């Protein structure tokens, strides 16, 4: 059994026909019908087949060419590294501000040590 889950519900992949289809998982009380179309998205012509990054961002433009730049293909490993780095940076900023889940506020030490 292969399961697929999304915020629309949990589905089981049925391989019995010519093409696999998603059917509501028997233990999900209310999966939405719209979730059953996810497999169709994998074949959509508009789907990105490989990771892309903005050329200027890769060159370190700091976002200066957003909206006017071209996208170039990058490796899957490079894409994962970039996303992981961004998520870490966002989390650390929230942690320092005391806004991350379960975070504490980082304060400067008091001069006299108390």
Image: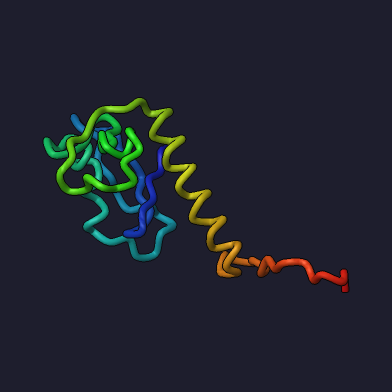
Where on the picture, by quarter, is residue 97? bottom right
On the image, the x and y values in percent for residue 78 come to 41, 30
On the image, the x and y values in percent for residue 22 come to 28, 45
Where on the picture, by quarter, is residue 70? top left
Quadrant where the image shows the C terminus:
bottom right
Residue ID at (36%, 53%) = 6
User: Could you tell whether 70 is left or right of 25 in the image?
Assistant: left
47 or 58, nearer to the observer:
58
On the image, the x and y values in percent for residue 90 come to 49, 55
Quadrant where the image shows the N terminus:
top left
Residue ID at (37%, 45%) = 4
In the depicted structure, whether residue 89 falls above or below residue 85:
below
Q: What residue occupies the far bottom of the structure in this picture?
A: 114
82 or 56, nearer to the observer:
56
On the image, the x and y values in percent for residue 35 come to 26, 54
User: Could you tell whether 103 is left or right of 30 in the image?
Assistant: right
In the depicted structure, whether residue 39 falls above or below residue 9:
above
Residue ID at (46%, 35%) = 81
Residue ID at (30%, 33%) = 51
């Amino acid at each position: 059994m292969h399961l697929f889950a999304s915020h629309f519900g949990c589905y089981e992949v049925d391989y019995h026909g010519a093409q696999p289809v998603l059917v509501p998982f028997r233990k999900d009380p209310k999966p939405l019908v719209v979730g059953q179309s996810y497999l169709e998205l994998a074949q959509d012509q508009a789907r990105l087949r490989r990771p892309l990054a903005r050329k200027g961002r890769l060159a370190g433009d700091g976002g200066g060419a957003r909206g006017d730049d071209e996208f170039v293909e990058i490796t899957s490993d490079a894409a994962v590294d970039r996303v992981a780095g961004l998520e870490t940076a966002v989390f650390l900023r929230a942690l320092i501000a005391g806004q991350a889940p379960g975070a504490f506020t980082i304060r400067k030490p008091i001069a006299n040590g108390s």
